[in-house]
Amino acid sequence: MSAPQQKPVVTEREARQVAEAAREQDWRKPSFAKELFLGRFRLDLIHPHPMPPDEDAQRGEEFLAKLRDFCETKVDGALVEREARIPDEVIAGLKELGALGMKIDTKYGGLGLTQVYYNKALALAGSACPAIGVLLSAHQSIGVPQPLKLFGTQEQKETFLPRCARTDISAFLLTEPDVGSDPARLATSAVPDGDEYVLDGVKLWTTNGVVADLLVVMARVPKSEGHKGGITAFVVESNSPGITVENRNAFMGLRGIENGVTRFHQVRVPAANRIGPEGAGLKIALTTLNTGRLSLPASCVAAGKWCLKIAREWSAAREQWGKPIADHEAVGAKISFIAATTFALEAVLDLSSQMADENRNDIRIEGALAKLFSSEMAWLMADELVQIRGGRGFETAASLAARGERAVPAEQVLRDLRINRIFEGSTEIMHLLIAREAVDAHLSVAGDLIDPEKSLSDKAKAGAQAGAFYAKWLPKLVAGQGQLPYSYNEFKREVDLSVHLRYVERTARKLARSTFYAMSRWQGRMETKQGFLGRIVDIGAELFAMSAVCVRAELLRTTEGHGREAYQLADVFCRQSRIRVEELFGRLWTNTDDLDRKVVKGVMSGTYEWLEEGIVDPSGEGPWIADATPGASEKENVHRPIR
């Protein structure tokens, strides 16, 4: 058996190649969002709004009723916040309820809920206690059940899924102390030894890792005779000899989550526990996240609904200058933003989830847009609620209760939501990930043309291909249905939403033209223009949200009694969104990106170090990044499985 690998030294180009190899290369199914970025508004892909089969809806509603009763009678969110831990009896109750198996097929002992109802359940549980929502999500969205559902063997499914459905909590271990969104530098090794692999390394921020029974671990298999090697996924029993949970981490929010640091030292894992072939680990992780990311928008929808409820009740009770604060325009604008945006987040989530259930469309971009848009907007809504509440928004719920007022945890929601802009792909990484998918068609036809390492003959061939593609594509961006006054008239009711759909169609073409112009201008340097790409993606996210709210409003008009109100909310959201879109378009070409880069160089070279004078740094001593050298643990094992 060979010694554990040393930490890989990876160039920027090699890191990009690893990330590119992990992408799904083909588009075998249509994608509404991909078409949108190409300037093609395919409303037919999302309208009429897809609906779950009656039997799926009935099963989902029955479970939601049981979960609601459990949350109302057994869950004390304030206790979890105070003690920074979910009581064991609550987790045991969730197991008994079947909540660990919401996404697991009934033939393996799960509930077999659809993505739509799974997300509704996460929103409900998360509203009672955000840490519970995270526990259930990390277990099922990215933990053992989802990778096995997509890539596991029949034997693996029969072995592990029944356990995950009722008794065993799972966790997903990818991040390391010095490896985040750049997995090419992954250092945890899995060295083949007969019918086993031997794991060595350290994993950081292992949500559920402190209490988990089963782990999905990403580790690097060294290339050798008979072994392709590469980053590979394994199911690992958490009580295996050599595994030590060295620390239970504490955070500014989500204080009840069981997130830790896990060390592997000569941990033996059967080859039968490998998920997929060697080297497929990153592809498995990214594919899992295509739908796994939808759990975050679910928590954001729950937060938005709660923010709206508190804003409404408080703004009616609180008076200033002779009238309720809701009647003051400055506060009223915030309430309108919260209401319209909550409607939009739910529209985006339900549409993306139902599309995932139907499996008719490729939703890799839609899921990523839902995560990006929801995490950013939910944070803004929570911030506005704190502002509406004033000093009481900054005060803790416990302090409010101690002096005789309603214990409203507004500041806690703000803290809890902040992480959504970071984990499962930070906003900055989501911008790059979505941008890469959005410009995929351009790179496919012009890849060799902009690759500095390709020969002149390769570039000439690529140039001919690109010319043929753009000769067909560019003329289609000149005119479309958005310029016809009677387009989308089925959305014209007492409130007219057709004007917004025409705007989306016109703006999608404008977005595609802007992207083409940038490709022509920067060519191979396009990937370095992260500010520009981020704005392109944000415009696409707004257009996707506008489309979703219009389609949802029409659905509610035909199926429920809130059609008129839904049209009103959709109209307000679209008008607010259009203002943001126009601002983003202005910033595509009028910005401080070049100046910012100069300032950054000055900051990093010490040019502005004088600006830091006059303070005391309260930070403690210690390295910026903890040592993760493989070896035996010297710390107490804080792993505590819940039985």
Image (cartoon, rainbow, N blue to C red):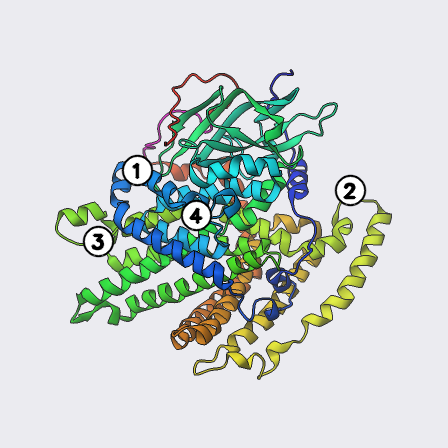
Q: Is residue 130 left or right of residue 477?
A: left
**Nearer the camera: disc 1 or disc 2:** 1
CB under 8 Å between discs 2 and 3:
no
How many residues crowd mark 3 within 10 Å: few (<14), some (14–19), many (20+)?
A: many
> In the rendered image, which residue does mark 1 sit on?
89
Q: Choose the circle earlier in sequence order: 1 or 2.
A: 1
> In the rendered image, which residue does mark 2 sit on?
453
Rendering coords of residue 262 (x, y %): 46, 27
| Relative to 469, residue 127 above or below | above
Name, please, the residue furthest toward the front: 107
> In the rendered image, which residue does mark 3 sit on?
392
Rendering coords of residue 67 (x, y %): 35, 51
What type is the residue that disc 2 sits on?
A: Glu
Specify the segment rendered in magenta: 616-625
Give the camera-side residue of 63 and 506.
63
Gap in Å between the C-alphas at discs 3 and 1? 32 Å
Gap in Å between the C-alphas at discs 4 and 2? 38 Å
What type is the residue that disc 4 sits on?
A: Asn
Q: Secondary structure at mark 4?
A: helix
- Identify the main secondary structure in magenta: loop
**Nearer the camera: disc 3 or disc 1:** 1
> In the rendered image, which residue does mark 4 sit on?
420
Gap in Å between the C-alphas at discs 2 and 3? 60 Å
Give the camera-side residue of 398 and 389.
398
Gap in Å between the C-alphas at discs 4 and 3? 24 Å
